[in-house]
Image (spheres, rainbow, N blue to C red):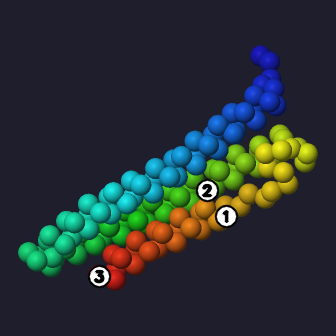
């Protein structure tokens, strides 16, 4: 069985990085949709039963924590794939050009800040 060339490996890694970027964007949208749905249920239950409204707050908190964990998990995979791509590309590459990829990079920090704001919405009500 022949080994896969570095060019093919690099191309596949770049496809995986694009895929992870798209997944992270979709995760943010799904979290927002779930949050809006649960917030709607929360406000409609607030007038009827305070006990049931507490359950929606817990569900909303669980959704936000779960998606924040997904974000960190995707960021760890992104870093792993990017480190391998940097190694394959070499120091004179045009794509990464001696950039460091971090797990808690700017995109991840902004996403986590948005999830924190959503969490504050749940507990600031």
How many angstroms separate mark 2 from mark 1 (CA)?
Answer: 8 Å
How many numbered discs sit on the rendered protein? 3
Mark 3 / mark 2, whichever is N-terminal: 2
| Disc 2 element | helix
**Percent from the top left, x then y, of residue 120?**
40, 78
- Say few, some or many: other residues with alpha carbon within 10 Å of mark 2 (under 14 / 14 to 19 / 20 or more): many
Q: CA distance from mark 1 to mark 3?
A: 30 Å
Q: Residue furthest top?
A: 1
Q: Nearer the viewer, residue 18 or 84?
A: 18
Q: Which quadrant of the view contains residue 13?
A: top right
Q: Which residue is mark 2?
A: 75
Taking 28 as reference, is 61 above or below it?
below
Residues under numbered marks 2 and 1 in contact, where contact means CB atoms less than 8 Å apart: yes
Query: Which residue is label 1 attached to?
Result: 105
Dot 1 or dot 3, earlier in sequence: 1
Contact between marks 1 and 3 (CB within 8 A): the answer is: no
Residue 125 got which mark? Answer: 3
Q: Give the residue furthest to the bottom.
A: 124
Identify the residue at horizontal 65%, vertical 50% (top origin).
78
């Amino acid at each position: 069985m022949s080994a896969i060339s570095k060019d093919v490996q690099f191309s596949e890694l770049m496809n995986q990085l694009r895929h992870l970027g798209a997944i992270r964007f979709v995760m943010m949208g799904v979290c927002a949709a779930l949050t809006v749905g649960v917030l709607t249920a929360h406000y409609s239950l607030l007038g009827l039963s305070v006990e049931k409204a507490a359950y929606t707050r817990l569900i909303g908190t669980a959704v936000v924590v779960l998606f924040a964990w997904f974000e960190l998990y995707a960021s760890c995979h992104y870093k792993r794939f990017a480190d391998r791509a940097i190694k394959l590309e070499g120091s004179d590459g045009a794509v990464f050009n001696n950039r460091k990829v971090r797990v808690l990079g700017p995109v991840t920090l902004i996403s986590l800040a948005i999830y924190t704001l959503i969490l504050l919405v749940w507990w600031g009500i």
